[in-house]
Image (cartoon, rainbow, N blue to C red):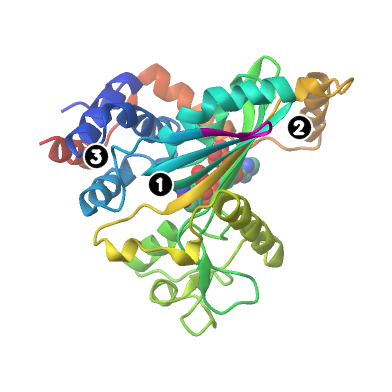
Amino acid sequence: MPQTVSTGELTGLLVRVFLRHGVSAENAGPVAETVVAAERDGAVSHGLLRLPGYVLTLKSGWVDGRAVPVVTDAAPGLVATEAANGFAQPALRAGAPLLREKARRQGIAPVAIRNSHHFAAVWPDIEPFAVEGFIALAMVNGRQRMVVWGGKRKLLGTSPMAFACPRPGRLPLVWDQASSVMAQGEVLLAAQHGKMLPEGVGLDADGRPTTDPRAVLDGGSILPFGGHKGSSIAFMIEILAGALTGGPFGFEDRSHEYPGAQTPKAGQTVILIDPLHVPGNRYFERIESLFGAIKASGVERLPADRRYAVRKQSLRNGIPLSDRDWETLQKLLA
Ligand code: NDP
């Protein structure tokens, strides 16, 4: 039983799992790679932990593993992709060449993806664009778990937003965060371990503040980060990833009609900017002045620093797999 695997070996295993459970050869690679990227970088909440959820969702019929995304050159400054009820990563990949070409030519271009299932971290979607020299911003909406500030019941997803920008001679700066004060998985873990939540994390089914994770999960809701400010960011994401793309809103979720389904059927908007189009902005020089000043102010850790450090270890020594992960893989391959 191996204790560590290389990224290539893990990708190969996951591709086999996805093929075994009804995902097409075209789609299996991009989905497997996003799971491996999370595991490689120590973002374990979105790595192998999610694999049984992918498989259960495929079995439920809620997602179509064989979906063929349709990319449309919607306007000079806009790519639109119909994910056809498939996974988000193949849909993004299908539109990426046109998106890149438009952003290079015009300086900026968004892609609006609809009817996609995003069950992963968002940074793997955009870090590669920043490596290519683009500033990238991505937003994904999801099924209802979070209250809008001032409301009494859940309405929106814990919708994540991620940002990446290129740096000269270094890996990009990348951040990726949910719009809720706490991820739903952490509330679930607290409930499983009989722990109470900190104040300010959730509301019960009647819209009253609670520290009981079971009350949050049982008809209650999670609060947005930063009160009304995070709430505004969350409904901006709902507009840009839901309304703009033509995809479903968080409160229109129908996954409960498909027993076992876990992935949110959502929309996704990714915006690329080529920083070299702005005359005289000296982007690469200026950005290092900014990070120099941040460091000089006493900040030791930037977003993604932790992930990059774990990545370095994984690429050097392999990705450590727990016995449980290994057993899960074998079970799903059987
Ligand atoms: P975290 O709060 O753990 O981290 C958010 C960001 O802040 C990361 O980029 C992290 O960098 C950075 N960070 C953390 N601590 C520090 C620090 N002390 N100083 C500077 N930067 C720091 O993320 P969330 O719990 O909000 O979200 C976790 C993941 O869940 C995300 O990847 C998100 O995309 C995903 N998600 C996906 C959803 C979906 O529907 N697909 C729904 C909701 C969430 P680093 O990576 O280096 O730790």
Q: Amino acid at mark 3?
A: Asp
312 or 206: nearer the viewer: 206
At label 3, counting other C-alpha atoms closer than 10 Å, the crowd grade (few under 14, some 14-19, many 20 or more) is some
Residue 187 position in % (x across, y down): 43, 64
At label 2, counting other C-alpha atoms closer than 10 Å, the crowd grade (few under 14, some 14-19, many 20 or more) is few
What's the CA distance linking mark 1 and mark 3? Answer: 18 Å
Question: Label 2's element?
Answer: helix
Query: Who's the residue at 59% across and 28% down the image?
Result: 99
- In the figure, residue 166 lies in which quadrant? top right
Query: Who's the residue at 71% across and 17% down the image?
Result: 168
Q: Nearer the viewer, mark 1 or mark 2?
A: 1
Relative to 74, residue 229 above or below: below
Q: Which of the two labelled residues, at mark 1 and mark 3, occupies the earlier sequence position?
A: 1
Q: Are marks 1 and 2 in contact (CB under 8 Å)?
A: no
Q: Is residue 33 visible?
A: yes
Q: Which of the two labelled residues, at mark 1 and mark 2, occupies the earlier sequence position?
A: 1
Give the position of the N terminus as an image quadrant: top left
Range of magenta residues: 72-78
Query: Who's the residue at 64% across and 18% down the image?
Result: 170
Q: Is residue 140 magenta?
A: no
Say which residue label 1 marks. Answer: 119
Say which residue label 3 marks. Answer: 325
Say which residue label 2 marks. Answer: 295
Q: Is residue 73 magenta?
A: yes
Q: Is residue 193 visible?
A: no
Task: Please name the predominant secondary structure of the magenta segment in the image.
Answer: strand
Q: Amino acid at mark 1?
A: Phe
Relative to 191, residue 46 above or below: above
